[in-house]
Amino acid sequence: MISSNMSLSPLIVTLSLDPPAFYFFNALRTKHFPPERNYLQAHLTLFHHLPPDEPSIITTLEQTAAQHAIIPLAVTGTAFIGKGVAYKIESKELMNLHATLQTTWKEWLTPQDQQRLWPHVTVQNKVNPTQARALYEQLTREFTPFTANGMGLSVWMYRDGPWEWLATYPFSKELCNTK
């Protein structure tokens, strides 16, 4: 269990990606994200601002991961996000997991975390729109849909820019065959 009195900085929860997907996205992020603003490796954020002093947050993550199967993900395309580019992710299982956690943590969610999840991995942000549009067009031309897996839940503490990794809770069950 993570000590809740580490700081009053908010907790962030991400979906851990399988190694091939993580390395693919992280290589693009390293190449295209402005280095002076790239505090993080590639990630898929599920919750942006949870209270660090609420022990049930960590308990829920531990229990959820222990009971959950690896999540199949479909990487379905690219998205232009104004000043950057992201890859779109689709997964019914991920959406269900997120909705369940939203219900569990309802009293602590910020307006951003109360919204329906838009699963994506950002590989470029905080550049001028012309530069972002050019990368979006390039990556869209080169894109072939592929699959990946969500392997667990990671919790981070926001540190005024950088994030401090606290723990990862791997899913304990194998990928379910949904065919």
Image (cartoon, grey):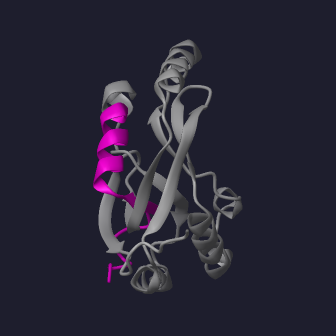
Asked if the stretch drawn in magenta spans residue 13, the answer is yes
- The residue at 54%/25% (across/down) is 140
Would you say residue 10 is visible in this rendering?
no
The residue most toward the front is 179
Question: In the picture shown, does residue 154 fall above or below 120?
Answer: below
Q: Which one is in front, 121 or 114?
A: 121
Rendering quarter of residue 124: top left
Coordinates of residue 36 in the picture (x, y in percent): 33, 28
Q: Which one is in front, 143 or 8?
A: 143
- The residue at 48%/62% (across/down) is 72
- The residue at 63%/51% (across/down) is 118
The image shows a total of numbered marks equal to 0
Q: Which one is in front, 143 or 80?
A: 143
Coordinates of residue 134 in the picture (x, y in percent): 52, 15
In the rendered structure, the answer to whether residue 121 lies left or right of residue 116 reads left
Question: In the picture shown, does residue 97 fall above or below 44?
Answer: below
Q: Quadrant of the N terminus?
A: bottom left
Question: In the picture shown, does residue 107 fall above or below 165?
Answer: below
In the rendered structure, the answer to whether residue 18 lies left or right of residue 49 reads left
Asked if the stretch drawn in magenta spans residue 51, the answer is no
Coordinates of residue 160 in the picture (x, y in percent): 41, 48
Q: Quadrant of the C terminus?
A: bottom right
Would you say residue 83 is visible in this rendering?
yes
Q: Which one is in front, 134 or 143?
A: 143
- The residue at 30%/49% (across/down) is 20
Magenta residues (range): 1-29
In the rendered structure, the answer to whether residue 79 lies left or right of residue 3 reads right
Coordinates of residue 95 in the picture (x, y in percent): 62, 65
Question: In the picture shown, does residue 121 fall above or below 107?
Answer: above
